Image (cartoon, rainbow, N blue to C red):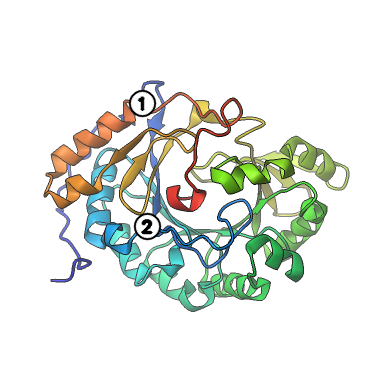
């Protein structure tokens, strides 16, 4: 049998008490990286010429991923977001999606992508069970987009977004990392683009993840400045939006557009953090801005029982730190974002 063949899931699953960390936060959300590879080289994520990716033999197989997510869902996790690197570069991804979508207790299965390969896969992903999409898009200017992404094609992304709309995805969220002196003059244009195409828009602050993230720190822009800029042009109303992420939302008056602000640096949201990350090699990270980690792959490949796997996850959650140290210790985390998962 293929190592990625379907695995039977018991029809009578006993859901267990929720995962609660030492600071009384309930863990309901896992960001799952299925590859650390990407076809773009965004300036804040991966350096040009980087090739030191994880060996595919070390990637979790579909069986192993399903087993880990089964353990999480039986412990009360309700949301899983598939990330990368660029997750659409992992072969047969709709097959994995369909397997995860069948897990009892999983109510929200979403995907983060740069959309360069979305045109070919949007319909299959929708049919397999992806419910929501987040698409990275930092510029609407083709030349600037190519510069930020290390040669990427804006047309490929726009084609992917069109295919996602045709497939019936809603909502589609556009993630724009705002960088001073790079794309901060496109804020209003991105708002109008999202109004026109009925997308949700989220602005994100740069983070000092790895050498590239720290190199981009000179482009850091406090999103309060972005909000003030928008308030001079638009009327912003308080709003909320379904999802498990940290964005704080407003709505542009007279439109359906909701704008989210994700502020890990200027207004950290650690006190409400409800998520952990599983890297492509099965490493469990309980905080994006800390180095605490638990290696799940060796356990999986030694034939660990589901109960022992769940105990390991509980022990990791018991060590989840109170907050990140991006501001006080910006050089602490040396891994790239593409490895940890977005």
Whether residue 151 sits left or right of residue 114 in the image: it is right
Report the residue at 64% width, 30% height from top. Answer: 267
Residue 197 at least partly seen: yes
Going 39% across and 35% down the picture, which residue do you hit?
Answer: 286
Q: Nearer the viewer, mark 2 or mark 1?
A: 2
Disc 2 element = loop
Residue named by callout 1 = 21
Q: How many marks?
A: 2
Instruction: Determine whether, in the image, residue 3 is placed left or right of residue 81.
Output: left
Q: In the rendering, at what x and y percent does residue 212 appear?
A: 60, 48
Q: Nearer the viewer, residue 334 or 203?
A: 334
Viewed as shown, does residue 106 lie left or right of 203?
A: left
Q: Position of residue 171 (x, y in %)?
A: 56, 58
Q: Residues within 10 Å of mark 2 (few under 14, many from 20)?
A: some
Q: Quadrant of the N terminus?
A: bottom left
CA–CA distance in space, label 2 to label 1: 29 Å
Q: Residues within 10 Å of mark 1 (few under 14, many from 20)?
A: many
Q: Looking at the picture, does residue 223 appear above or below residue 188?
A: above
> Which is more N-terminal, label 1 or label 2?
1
**Among all residues in the image, which is located at the extreme top?**
23
Disc 2 designates what residue? Answer: 54
Name the residue located 26 percent from the left edge and 29 percent from the top edge: 315
Mark 2–mark 1 CB contact (< 8 Å): no
Find residue 195 and report its image quarter.
Answer: bottom right
Residue 6, placed above or below residue 77? below
Q: Which mark is residue 199?
A: none
Extreme residue in the bottom direction: 120
Tell me the SS state at disc 1.
loop
């Amino acid at each position: 049998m293929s190592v990625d063949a379907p695995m039977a899931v018991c029809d009578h699953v006993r859901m267990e008490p929720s995962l609660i960390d030492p600071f009384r936060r309930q863990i309901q959300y896992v960001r799952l990286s299925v590859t650390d590879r990407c076809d773009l080289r965004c300036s804040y994520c991966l350096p040009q010429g980087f090739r030191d990716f994880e060996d595919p033999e070390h990637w979790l197989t579909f069986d192993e991923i399903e087993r880990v997510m089964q353990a999480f869902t039986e412990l009360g996790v309700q949301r899983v977001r598939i990330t990368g690197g660029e997750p659409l570069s992992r072969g047969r991804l709709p097959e994995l999606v369909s397997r995860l979508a069948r897990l009892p207790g999983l109510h929200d299965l979403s995907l983060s992508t740069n959309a360069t390969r979305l045109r070919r896969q949007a319909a299959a992903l929708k049919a397999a069970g992806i419910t929501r999409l987040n698409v990275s898009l930092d510029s609407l200017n083709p030349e600037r987009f190519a510069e930020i992404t290390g040669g990427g094609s804006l047309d490929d992304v726009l084609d992917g977004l069109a295919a996602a709309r045709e497939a019936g995805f809603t909502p589609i969220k556009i993630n724009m990392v705002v960088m001073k002196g790079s794309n901060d003059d496109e804020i209003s244009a991105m708002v109008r683009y999202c109004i026109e195409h009925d997308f949700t828009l989220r602005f994100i602050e740069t983070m000092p993840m790895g050498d590239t993230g720290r190199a981009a720190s000179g482009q850091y822009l406090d999103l309060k400045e972005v909000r003030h800029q928008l308030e001079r042009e638009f009327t912003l109303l308080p709003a909320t939006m379904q999802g498990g992420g940290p964005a704080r939302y407003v709505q542009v008056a007279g439109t359906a557009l909701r704008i989210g602000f994700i502020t890990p640096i200027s207004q950290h949201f650690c006190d409400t953090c409800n998520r952990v990350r599983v890297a492509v090699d099965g490493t469990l990270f309980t905080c994006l801005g800390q180095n605490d980690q638990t290696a799940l792959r060796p356990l999986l490949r030694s034939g660990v029982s589901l109960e022992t796997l769940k105990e390991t996850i509980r022990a990791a959650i018991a060590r989840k730190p109170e907050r990140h140290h991006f501001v006080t210790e910006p050089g602490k985390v040396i891994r790239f974002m593409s490895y940890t998962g977005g």
